[in-house]
Amino acid sequence: MKADLSDLNAFVAVARAKGFRDGARASGSSASGLSEAVRRLEAQLGVRLLNRTTRSVAVTEAGQRLLDRLGPALLEVETALDVVNSFRDRPAGTLRLNVPVSASRLILPAIVPPFLAAYPEIRLEVVADESFVDVLAAGCDAGIRYDERLEQDMIAVPIGPRIQRFAAAASSAYLDRAGRPAHPRDLLGHACLLGRFASGALTTPWEFERDGEVVRVEPAGPLIVSVGGAIDLAVEAAIAGSGIISLFEGWLRPHLDSGALEPVLESWWQSFPGPFLYYPGRRLVPAPLRAFLDFVKAAGARA
């Protein structure tokens, strides 16, 4: 039984987006065209792949099994077709990256504009996601993660600053009112602004280090925000005097430099290795990804 490749792509787009409209936006197609393609595929296969209501789309068991096999397979097809890019003067095509919000804010701004200028025929799609996802299953070519969250059997290339720090800070008004901590354990008596990951876990304990001594504390406070999309709310709350925040130094640096925030326990700020660009160890690497890898490596060599 042969199925049209475009119909298979349509099904994958709708299943991943969990809707025809979102699938259309992600794939650059029309919702009606995707709907017709999925109907045609279901008729050809003789099984229902999607359960549809007026408000939602859910993948059936049969559809999920097909999706699990199709994602990597279609990516391999796309990679194989992309080999012809090596015969072009300049690489072309779409490059999809799955990255944490911190990387989209602190790492990519220095890389993306010059990369797009150097490769005008490449279309870059960046998906900022704090969840630990399979980049292939998510339809992405590569991802950015820190060492402890790298998937196994992936090739990893350093990207961005190789050493970063977590910083703690608060407004001077808050510290004048509540006092300035002299030791990490003093944070237990302060209002601290926390984050929550998509998994439900809080961004605690906060970890500090000085002269080989590591101190972990479990602070509490008046505000918890989702990691990623709502972190800026916590930063603004800290500036307004609501409490102490702990975050990437690079995220807080503009506010520290402007005086809107004051460093807290700076001699205890813990450093950690920078992130990696990682991708599957396939024999054929898509031309857009190869161009990005070469660009990142060259940027690292110049740093």
Image: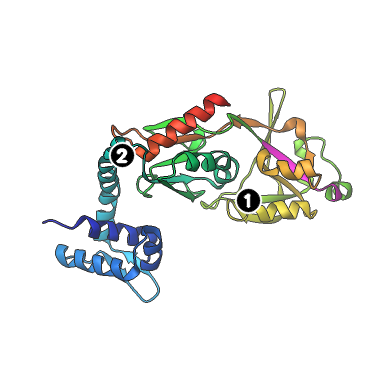
Q: Is residue 42 above or below residue 254?
A: below
Instruction: Of the two numbered discs 1 and 2 on the same chain, state the one appearing first in sequence.
Output: 2
- Which percent across, then down, holds residue 157? 46, 30
Residue located beneath label 2 in the image: 85
Q: Is residue 274 above or below residue 177?
A: above
The residue at the point 88 percent across, 47 percent down is 176
- Which percent across, then down, holds residue 298? 49, 28
Q: What range of the chain is rendered magenta?
A: 166-173
Provide the secondary structure element on which disc 2 rests: helix
Mark sitting on residue 41: none
Q: Residue furthest front?
A: 89
Task: Decide which of 249, 107 is in the foreground and name it.
Answer: 107
Task: Decide which of 227, 190 is in the foreground and name it.
Answer: 227
Q: Can residue 18 be seen from the camera position used here?
A: no
Asked if marks 1 and 2 touch (Cβ < 8 Å), the reply is no
Residue located beneath label 1 in the image: 195
The residue at the point 52 percent across, 48 percent down is 130
- Which percent across, then down, holds residue 267? 76, 30
Task: Decide which of 22, 194 is in the foreground and name it.
Answer: 22
The residue at the point 38 percent across, 50 percent down is 138
Q: Is residue 171 magenta?
A: yes
Q: Amino acid at mark 1?
A: Gly
Q: Amino acid at mark 2?
A: Asn
